[in-house]
Amino acid sequence: MIRKMILTTSLATLLLAASVAHADDDRRLPVERLDGVLEQAAAFGFTHYQEIEVKRDESVEVEGWLDDEWQAEVRLSLASGESLEEERKRREGGAWGMSEADVRLAMESAVAEGMAEFAELQVDRDGRIEIEGYDTDGRELEVKSRQGERDVIEVEVD
């Protein structure tokens, strides 16, 4: 009886671990797909990017600015290009974040450090960029750089 319970518990643990690993696979995209994400975000109206995060169900969440007054958080379907959810807020102080060129430069730096898939890219007000993703062996990478610079500040491998 105890042996049967241990076997059942072990099987349940393995299934849970597999489902968590599969969920993580759903939250990453090959770096080559960044172009499509940026095209969809630009078509929506984004001019400045604060965060791009891959979500489950073939979607991405983009946070940034549509112009100097409107900040937005939008979930876009990668399959259809449609907006699945959106929230806009009128803000004072002007737009900040990365331009499309800044996003591409940061991703080029991450790729040079071995990133093959990305999960999240974000920038803070001081221009510090963090890109979380995975290398070709599936190891987690976090690449840190500065806005507008090709040089990488730090790389963490888990």
Image: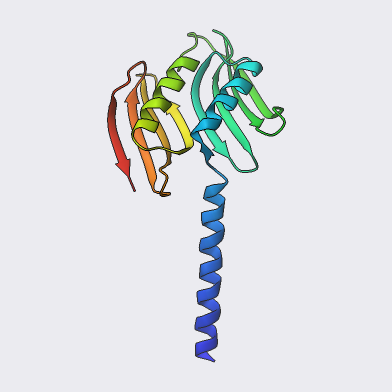
Residue, x 55% and y 71% (percent of image)?
Answer: 12
Q: Please provide percent x and percent y for residue 59.
A: 63, 36
Residue name at image x 55 percent, y 24 percent: 35
Residue 73 placement (x, y as % from top left): 59, 25
Where's residue 15, x and y in %? 56, 66
Position of 126 relative to 154 (above/below): above
Q: Please report the residue visible at 53 percent of the width from the left and 61 percent of the height from the top.
A: 18
Picture layout, residue 152 above or below residue 139: above
Q: Which residue lies furthest to the bottom in this view?
A: 1
Residue in the foreground of this view, choosing between 128 and 136:
136
Rendered location of residue 24, percent (x, y): 52, 49
User: Does 126 sit above or below residue 30?
Assistant: above
- Most foreground residue, 89 or 46: 46
Residue 13 horizontal side relative to residue 77, left or right: left
Rendered position, 97 above or below 85 = above
The total of numbered circles placed on residues is: 0
Q: Nearer the viewer, residue 14 or 150?
A: 150
Tell me where residue 76 sits by quadrant: top right
Quadrant including the N terminus: bottom right
The colouring scheme, among rainbow, by chain, secondary structure or one colour, is: rainbow
